Image: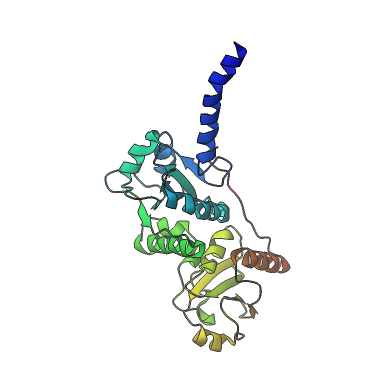
Amino acid sequence: MIKALVLLLLPIAYCSLDTVSNDLFSPSDNVEILTGHNFKRLVEKSPTAWLVNFYSNTNVRSKEFSLIWKKLATEAKSWRDLVRVGVVDCSKEINKEICRQSFVLAYPTVKYFHERGSLGKTDFGYHVITSLKFDWLKRNVVNVFQNVISKSPGNGLQLQYPRGIVPTADPSQQKLFEGVKKNVKYVILVIEDFRQPLGAEMALHFHRTPQVAFKRTVLASGATLKHLLKLPPLPLPHIVITDRRNNVEIISHNINETMSMKWVLHKYLQSKGIKPIVVIPKKLTQ
């Protein structure tokens, strides 16, 4: 009798294990797992914006993209008070209506929902171009942030993000302190090429840190600016730090990746007596 009962339970156990092992995202990941139950409650009228990956658990490209999306969510942990990174599995029956309402026509589809937005007749999310190349995806996300800031005058959306996300039109030394708060002691200008939005990432990562403002300029070839600032003949990026007295320091080594640039700037700010404030807000879903 016991043996028969065990045999009856085995298929159920295997089925359960199969379901868990096939999930592309889990509560232990740095993404918010959204469903038909919580999507509207968490996303609509949210104090933060949302980046949502609509995927299908059975779709090959969704599986490939899931690794990239997890990596983005991990790097964006310190941005959660500005924008949260979520996922919706459109292959699950409970989520299909949300995917239809969001006009998801292919997998994966990434959409940006701005803060305090109203889902429904007009707001179906802003489409973000996906990529299996991580730097390209980050660039596409930053481009969306830039568009939101530039196309939303007067409604407060441009105030959510640091000014440093949008490339500065005039990165000359005389203009660096224009538009920054009076308590800012240092302006950190990141000179980069179009491939990696490192300046925007730094502005987002350190956005809580006082007495410092970030700006960025994107150059296909930084020849003109390099000549003006007498930058060393090294590939981009460069970091140019200016204080209120127009003293300039240039950093050009060990800054070609996100983590290394964060570490270098963290150490630099500490050397100037400024404590970097990087807060990781808790996830909303478990």
Which residue is outermost to the left? 121
Numbered marks: total: 0
- The residue located at (59%, 42%) in the rendering is 28
Q: Quadrant of residue 146?
A: bottom left
Visual colour scheme? rainbow
Q: Position of residue 9 (x, y in %)?
A: 55, 21
State which quarter of the image contains the C terminus: top right
**101 sits to left or right of 131:** left
Task: Decide which of 241, 73 is in the foreground and name it.
Answer: 73
Task: Decide which of 13, 246 is in the foreground and name it.
Answer: 13
State which quarter of the image contains the N terminus: top right
Can the viewer see residue 243?
A: no
Seen in the picture, residue 265 relative to 245 is either above or below; the reply is above
Q: Quadrant of residue 273?
A: bottom right
- The residue located at (54%, 68%) in the rendering is 199
Q: Position of residue 256 (x, y in %)?
A: 60, 71
Q: Position of residue 55 (x, y in %)?
A: 42, 46
Q: Position of residue 235 (x, y in %)?
A: 57, 80
**43 sits to left or right of 286:** left
Q: Quadrant of residue 277?
A: bottom right
Seen in the picture, residue 117 relative to 236 is either above or below; the reply is above
Can the viewer see residue 97?
A: yes
Seen in the picture, residue 65 relative to 263 is either above or below; the reply is above
Task: Decide which of 131, 185 is in the foreground and name it.
Answer: 131
Which residue is outermost to the top? 1
- The residue located at (57%, 15%) in the rendering is 4
